[in-house]
Image (tube, grey):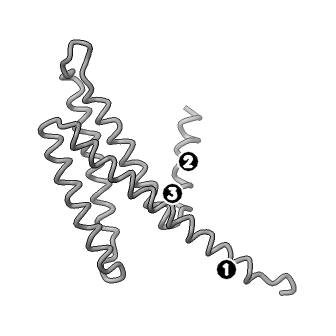
Amino acid sequence: MAYKNALSAYRETRIKTAGQGQLIIMLYDAAVQHLDAALEHLQLNSAGKRDPSRIEKTGKAVLKTQEIITELMVSLNMEAGGEIAANLFSLYTWFNRELLEASISLDAVRISTVRGMIADLRGAWREVAAKTASASNTDVVSGVSIAG
């Protein structure tokens, strides 16, 4: 019980102290994890059939991913982001539509396609966040005056 509370407190602190880029990466990470779970639930059993008891779990994992994608959509700043924000909005809309269709038809290929694209976006955001962080650290270090 104490372990769960400590883990929960750690996660909450991590989220509250994360920068905007890091939060986006966390959302992408969670989306990939949920899609991995959905794909695992869709695997065929030894008889070559899907386990009906896992269909609901698949739907819940896909739904969680759709909620994350919707959160990413509403976090876009369309004015400041311009064409990039508009393109991301279109891509997120497509992700949600594909996941809806995949959830209805239990289509692992569609889920896998969306998962791969989200993983690619996560990688791009990691690069941007790393470059931004290193640029910020350089600015902070060069702006520090020991003499005061």
Q: Residue at x 21, y 43 (%)?
A: 110
Q: Earlier in the sequence, mark 2 or mark 1?
A: 2
**Which quarter shows the N terminus?**
top right
- Local SS, label 2: helix
Question: Residue 15, labelled with which disc?
Answer: 3
The residue identified by callout 2 is 9
Q: Can you tell which quarter of the image residue 78 is in?
A: bottom left
Q: Residue at x 56, y 71 (%)?
A: 132
Q: Position of residue 90 (x, y in %)?
A: 22, 66
Q: Earlier in the sequence, mark 2 or mark 3?
A: 2
The residue identified by callout 1 is 139
How far apart, in angstroms, are the residues tagged by discs 3 and 1? 24 Å
How far apart, in angstroms, are the residues tagged by discs 2 and 1? 31 Å
Image depth: mark 2 or mark 1 in front:
1
Q: Position of residue 26 (x, y in %)?
A: 45, 54
Q: Residue at x 77, y 81 (%)?
A: 144
Image depth: mark 3 or mark 1 in front:
1
Q: Rate crowding at label 3 as few (under 14), some (14 to 19) or many (20 or more) other CA atoms within 10 Å.
A: some
Name, please, the residue furthest toward the top: 47
How far apart, in angstroms, are the residues tagged by discs 2 and 3? 10 Å
Name, please, the residue furthest toward the bottom: 148
Q: Amino acid at mark 1?
A: Asp
Q: Amino acid at mark 3?
A: Ile
Q: Amino acid at mark 2?
A: Ala
In screen coordinates, is 74 left or right of 102? right
- Local SS, label 3: helix
Badge 3 vs badge 1, beta-carbon distance below 8 Å? no
